[in-house]
Amino acid sequence: MKRIIIIEDEAILVKSLEYLLKRLGYETVASADNGADAVKLINDLKPDIVLMDISLHGETDGIETTELINQTENPPPVVFLTAYSEEAISARAKNVMQFGYILKPVDERELAVTLEFALFRKLVSDRERATAKTLATLVNLIDSVVIIIDSKGYVKDLSPKALTLLKTDKENCSSIKFGEIYSFVAAPHIRPLWDPVEHTLKTGNHFDFPEDSFMLKNEKVLAEISAGSLMPVLSGETVQGALLVLKTKSKPNESRPFTEFE
């Protein structure tokens, strides 16, 4: 059971979150309503993950508190709670929102998806740990669409959900050159994204998919993406491949012409 700390100054919301988190299999080990107590609790209890409200009692808000937490050794991932939409979140907040955020009022499914995604992203955020051996083990443990791509752009391994989405099996996946078959677009302007896999393989840069993105095959929607990230697999400074992790909204096997979304 994953251990979580809630940093939130609304007592009623804390109780509600504790209930939802228990249903999702998390143990709430502590809560606090201010930044000073939050930093002390996190240092003492070393939780697996933290839920952090942007607005807190006291002089230190959730953003500054997270900056302090990130200066500690092996800090836990921090997922933000906010009443503001993405457009209203300040640039200062976005700089520390590397593990995502959840809008209030909190939706249970969104909470589950965001926490799981943050935990997985934490596992591979340390580039030295993101080795092919590590990823081969992790890929079967995560309840997401996970695709490992080699340095030439060919699919190397897939999670069970990815196998279902791509309608393939592990024996045949190595023949798939990802960028030649699959593409991504982003709403609301239906603009195509440049090939993010090729970009990551060439540059070694991390790529986060914008909200309301779609994964396409032959101009048909395979999945609506609620969260997604593409990370390089490195050996030292050499890019050995890429790791694609997607949380999807639509059901696998529900391929629809993209024109239905326009």
Image (tube, rainbow, N blue to C red):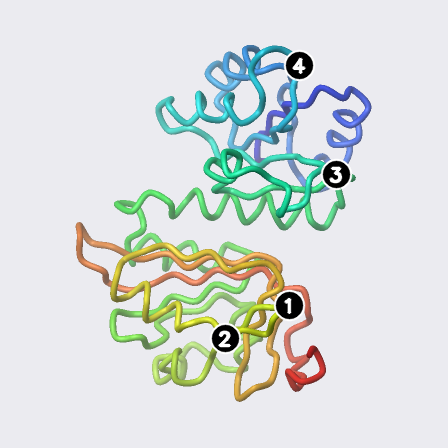
The quadrant in which the N terminus is found is top right
| Residue at 40% from the left image edge and 84% from the top image edge | 172
Q: Please state if 240 lies on the left or on the right of 15 as rendered.
A: left
Judging depth in this view, the residue of 165 and 206 nearest the camera is 206
Amino acid type of the residue tagged 1 in the rendering? Pro
Placement of 243 over or under 236, stated as above or below: below
At a point 54% along the width and 33% down the height, the residue shown is: 49
Provide the secondary structure element on which disc 2 rests: strand
Count residues near mark 1 (Cα–Cα under 10 Å), then give few for <14, some for 14-19, many for 20+. Answer: few
**Amino acid type shown at disc 3:** Lys
Q: If you read the primary sequence from the N terminus, does the residue marked by circle 4 or circle 3 appear first? A: 4
Q: Residues within 10 Å of mark 4 (few under 14, many from 20)?
A: some
Amino acid type for the residue under numbered disc 2 = Pro
Residue 192: image tag: 2
| Place of residue 254 in the rendered image (x, y in percent of width and height, measured from the top left) | 68, 79
Instruction: Please name the residue shown 27% across and 58% down the image.
Output: 204
Near mark 3 (Cα within 10 A), the count class, few <14, some 14-19 or many ≥20, is few
The numbered mark at residue 57 is 4
Nearer the N terminus, badge 4 or badge 2?
Answer: 4
- To which residue does mark 1 refer? 188
Residue drawn 62% across the image and 59% down it: 226
**Residue position for label 3:** 104
The answer to whether mark 1 and mark 3 are in CB contact below 8 A is no
